[in-house]
Amino acid sequence: MTVDEQRKVGEDPVPVPSLVPSAGAWAVFLVLPLVVMAYTLWRSPLYWSIPPDPTNWDAAQFALHGHIDKIYSTTTGLVSFPGLVLLSLPVAAASNLFHLGSLTTGSGHSLRPTAWYLWGPWVSLVAGSVILAADSVAGQLRITRGRRLILAIVEAALVWQLIVLWGHPEDALAVAVFLWAWLASEHHQWTGAGWLMGVAIAVQPVVLLVLPILWVRCPAGRRLGFLIRSAVISVVVLAPELLTSFHATFASLVRQPNYPTLDHATPLLWLAPRLAPVGGVETVAAGPARLASLGLCCLVAYGVYRWHPAPDRLVWCFALCFALRSLLESVMDPYYVWSALALAVLVAATRQGLYFVLAAVTAILVTGYAQTDHSPWVWWGPLIVGTALVLWAGFPRAGSQPAAGSPIDDRSGATLPAT
């Protein structure tokens, strides 16, 4: 029932939640690049504290010079889809135009690469987009503005490692665009949701873990169109790579090589298939474990299909799916736990203050602990336990019936009207 129809029958209309990010979220989003640049430029008097692995920068430089066959190579180490590489081309081109110092390791690399003047603010805004998206979701869940400001600060603290320590803002951007896709679906805008999901996948395919949930929520008659829109952008951006360097692209995207001696091996390392060493470094395939994670996420989607959880529990299911990735990984980077923690804290903001504080503090502590170096059980075990604690603190205790106006999966094939 629309607001006008509610007024005609004498009912008090239910206020429509505003999805426009709050002023507090915008403030945190705009301050984040300033804090990042201050930290990276002034932390040490000898060098700039920038991420040591400029994956997207290297790939963008190859693309600018027409060497698209080298985007997926051992030089870049890129194992995600090239969506952010394409979005970064104007920034990389401007850096070359002004002859700024390259971020690339090896030849031309310096302790103060002036390309960071452009690249640093760019990746900060890219990763910071999740602050705005999370705030919009908080508005959908009717979280108060005061708590939304606290949430924005916590999300900025969690996303910090993606910008400064690891240089992988594509993870945050993909989650942000996925959240906007979910918000579009909550308002029955399934065409827009499909295209947004396609953008998210093209940026970082880790969001495939939550695609099954959106798919089962989609009205039956629109599911094929939703899947096509979700896939077509990735097909377009990957086609040149597959045509020019099929073997390297296939190896990067399907086998997903990872390095147990350079990254963090987990107790499940013995299950990972061994690959040929790269530069004398031991390499294993992460792809099979991630397919197993996707299978478990399909089971979560089946539960969503059967029980139609309310929006807050649905966001919690998204966090659970991202957490399943860390549960089954054979080799991890510290930032892998980020997406589960960010969404679990988001839904924890709907609960009583003590649970929200517990979730936020635990998430920050887990993020900090992930940056340490220990034996597999001593490192991986606390991360899993800490993530589980954040999920527990964030689990909504309210009833799980669909909220008024939410798009309920229609097994008969009928499409729900927009309100």
Image: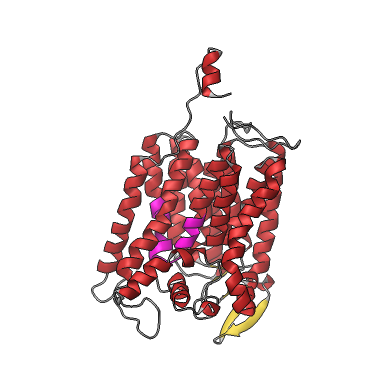
Q: Nearer the viewer, residue 21 or 111?
A: 21
The magenta span reads 155-174
**Quadrant of the image occupied by residue 267:** bottom right
Task: Give the dominant element type of the magenta stretch: helix, strand or loop.
Answer: helix
Give the colour scheme of this rendering: secondary structure
Q: Nearer the viewer, residue 283 or 200?
A: 200
Q: Say if residue 10 shows up in the picture.
A: yes
166 within the magenta span: yes
- The relative height of residue 121 versus residue 14 in the rendered view (above or below) is below
Q: Residue at x 72, y 35 (%)?
A: 414
* Relative side of 314 to 138, left or right: right
Residue 404, how many percent across, how many down? Answer: 58, 28
* Relative side of 36 to 84, left or right: left
Q: Residue at x 51, y 67 (%)?
A: 333
Residue 238, how many percent across, how many down? Answer: 59, 68
Residue ranking furthest to the right: 412
156 within the magenta span: yes
* Relative side of 109 to 395, left or right: left
Residue 261, how many percent across, how many down? Answer: 54, 78
- Quarter of the image that includes the C terminus: top right
* Relative side of 51 to 329, left or right: left
Q: Residue at x 69, y 70 (%)?
A: 271
Residue ranking furthest to the top: 10
Residue ranking furthest to the left: 45
Residue 402, how many percent across, how many down? Answer: 62, 32
Q: Residue at x 32, y 66 (%)?
A: 118
- The relative height of residue 38 versus residue 362 in the rendered view (above or below) is below
Label count reads 0
Q: Nearer the viewer, residue 235 or 108?
A: 235
**Quadrant of the image occupied by residue 113:** bottom left
Q: Say if residue 341 shows up in the picture.
A: no
- Quarter of the image that includes the N terminus: top right
